């Protein structure tokens, strides 16, 4: 097992990794920017090293500084967390070239699955259902129009690199396709340095469902159940729950088998998430993309399967075989995760950085809070606005929702505005309670309704 592990990340995921490492007897080194010097991960790690000023490009995205810190701290492994460099195949290869273990998949697997066009081609070859559309990037507006005419409008323009909704547009006719393609290409080039886009059929009434997988270096891959991430705004997830309340056991089994097939086709090891779009009209699922890292929403899977995914990541990277088989995975109950962000949700979710006054998190059976914040902590404006992830686990969905309502009522954060009020309103929404939402519900319907 590793003696000392460097965490190339910040916030709650850095603290989450520190806690698991402590249980495993592994020392931790946290790298941080100047604005994060007072963060909990810095206070709790065995070693902390400043790698640059506040802007991420000069700190958390600075590969040279991270590697220098790793050598200075004499670590034998690096965990990238999520975001930043977690899906950067070049970073993963540099780490391994420096004879340091990278807690994640190989660079080859990242490159095969991190690019949406390449991943779709691999999925199709592995027999995994894919959305009708182009198999590779469209070379010109004329190529895009040809694909659109073959599959019919509406179509989705999607950047092959990155995620989070950037480089994505929906087109309903030729004119909006040509203009949308140019906009998506510019946005993708600016965000990811790659302007390539693919064209796919746009599923009108969809749910976003993903499968958590974990693989070892001995060829074993296991699916740990599903998560429904359909409650989202502008392609950003707001609520995640497990299991999905809309798919049948047979579809769930089929999706898990498809996810495992894709992972094995890519010779994938470590944690990963295979994302699918589920067509409510056709009751059919299609491969969307694969995230080659741990996900923000991984705790709902942990709650339903009684696993520690961070520990499993570290163990399989150290060469251990998975301690269970597919037959051993029997998820139970229902888990829901919501993201508590420092945002003014009544003002277009605008970020609200600033100092936290009173901070009191809920607790009790079935309640989990993953957070790096505390009373007196100043949320910086440089990074994402997440304060915490609040996760609950109940005997069924109705029980989990009641528990989440209780936990939200007990969550006290004074200072910055937060999204707690949004989630409290959502939990009273009839369509959410009745499982009648789609991925477009929040954007197109929720805010037009009078509060319950």
Image (tube, rainbow, N blue to C red):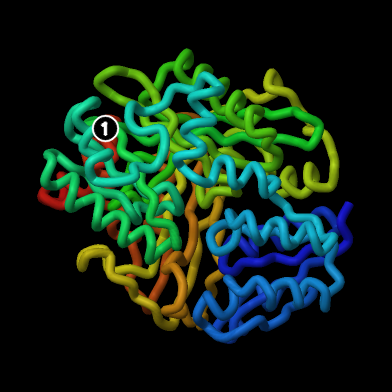
Q: Position of residue 70 (x, y in %)?
A: 78, 71
Q: Where is 363 relative to 270, above or below?
A: below
Q: Which sits in the foreground, 444 or 93? A: 93
Q: Position of residue 437 (x, y in %)?
A: 25, 35
Q: Position of residue 136 (x, y in %)?
A: 41, 38
Q: Position of residue 41 (x, y in %)?
A: 65, 72
Q: Which sits in the foreground, 235 or 195? A: 195
In this picture, residue 42 sits left or right of residue 24: left
Q: Where is 184 relative to 126, above or below?
A: below
Most extreme residue toward the top is 250
Label 1: few (<14), some (14–19) or many (≥20) C-alpha neighbours in 10 Å:
many
Identity of the residue drawn at 61% across and 34% down? 213
Counting the numbered discs, the total is 1
Identity of the residue drawn at 44% across and 30% down? 287
Can residue 331 be seen here?
no
Q: Where is 258 relative to 288, above or below?
A: above
In this picture, residue 447 sits left or right of residue 52: left
Identity of the residue drawn at 45% across and 39% down? 117
Identity of the residue drawn at 59% across and 46% down? 111
In this picture, residue 146 sits left or right of residue 112: left
Q: Which sits in the foreground, 11 or 266? A: 266
Q: Where is 137 relative to 58, above or below?
A: above
Can residue 433 be seen here?
yes
Quarter of the figure with residue 184: bottom left
Helix, strand or loop under label 1: helix
* Residue linked to disc 1: 147
């Amino acid at each position: 097992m590793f003696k000392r592990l460097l965490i190339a990340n910040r916030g709650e995921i850095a603290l989450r990794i520190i806690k698991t490492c402590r249980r495993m007897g592994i020392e931790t080194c946290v790298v941080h920017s100047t604005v994060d010097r007072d963060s909990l991960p810095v206070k709790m790690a065995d070693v902390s090293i400043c790698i640059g000023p506040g802007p991420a490009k000069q700190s958390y995205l600075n590969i040279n500084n991270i590697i220098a810190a790793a050598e200075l701290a004499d670590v034998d492994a690096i965990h990238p967390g999520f975001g930043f460099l977690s899906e950067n195949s070049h970073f993963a290869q540099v780490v391994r070239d420096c004879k340091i273990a990278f807690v994640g998949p190989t660079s080859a697997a990242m490159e095969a699955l991190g690019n949406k066009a390449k991943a779709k081609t691999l999925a199709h070859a592995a027999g995994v259902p894919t959305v009708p559309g182009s198999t590779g990037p469209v070379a010109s507006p004329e190529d895009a129009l040809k694909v659109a005419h073959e599959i019919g409008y509406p179509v989705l323009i999607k950047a092959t690199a990155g995620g989070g909704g950037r480089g994505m547009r929906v087109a309903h006719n030729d004119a909006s396709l040509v203009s949308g393609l140019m906009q998506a290409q510019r946005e993708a080039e600016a965000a990811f340095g790659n302007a390539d886009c693919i064209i796919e059929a746009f599923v009108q009434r969809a749910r976003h469902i993903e499968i958590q997988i974990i693989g070892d270096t001995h060829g074993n891959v296991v699916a740990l159940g599903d998560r429904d991430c359909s409650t989202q705004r502008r392609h950003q997830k707001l609520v995640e729950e497990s299991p999905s309340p809309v798919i049948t056991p047979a579809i769930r089994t089929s999706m898990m088998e498809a996810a495992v097939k894709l992972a094995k086709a890519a010779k994938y090891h470590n944690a990963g998430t295979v994302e699918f779009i589920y067509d409510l009209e056709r009751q059919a699922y299609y491969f969307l993309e694969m995230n080659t890292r741990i996900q923000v929403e991984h705790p709902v899977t942990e709650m339903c399967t009684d696993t520690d995914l961070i520990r499993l990541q570290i163990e399989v990277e150290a060469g251990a075989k998975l301690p269970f088989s597919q037959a051993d995975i029997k998820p139970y109950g229902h888990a829901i995760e919501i993201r508590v962000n420092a945002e003014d949700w009544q003002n277009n979710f605008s970020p609200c950085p600033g100092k936290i006054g009173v901070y009191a998190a809920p607790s009790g059976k079935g309640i989990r809070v993953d957070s790096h914040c505390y009373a007196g902590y100043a949320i910086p404006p440089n990074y994402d606005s997440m304060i915490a992830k609040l996760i609950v686990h109940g005997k069924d969905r109705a029980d989990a929702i009641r528990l989440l309502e209780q936990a939200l009522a007990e969550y006290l954060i004074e200072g910055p505005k937060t999204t707690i009020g949004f989630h409290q309103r959502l939990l009273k929404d009839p369509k959410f309670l009745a499982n009648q939402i789609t991925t477009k519900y929040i954007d197109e319907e929720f805010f037009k309704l009078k509060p319950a």
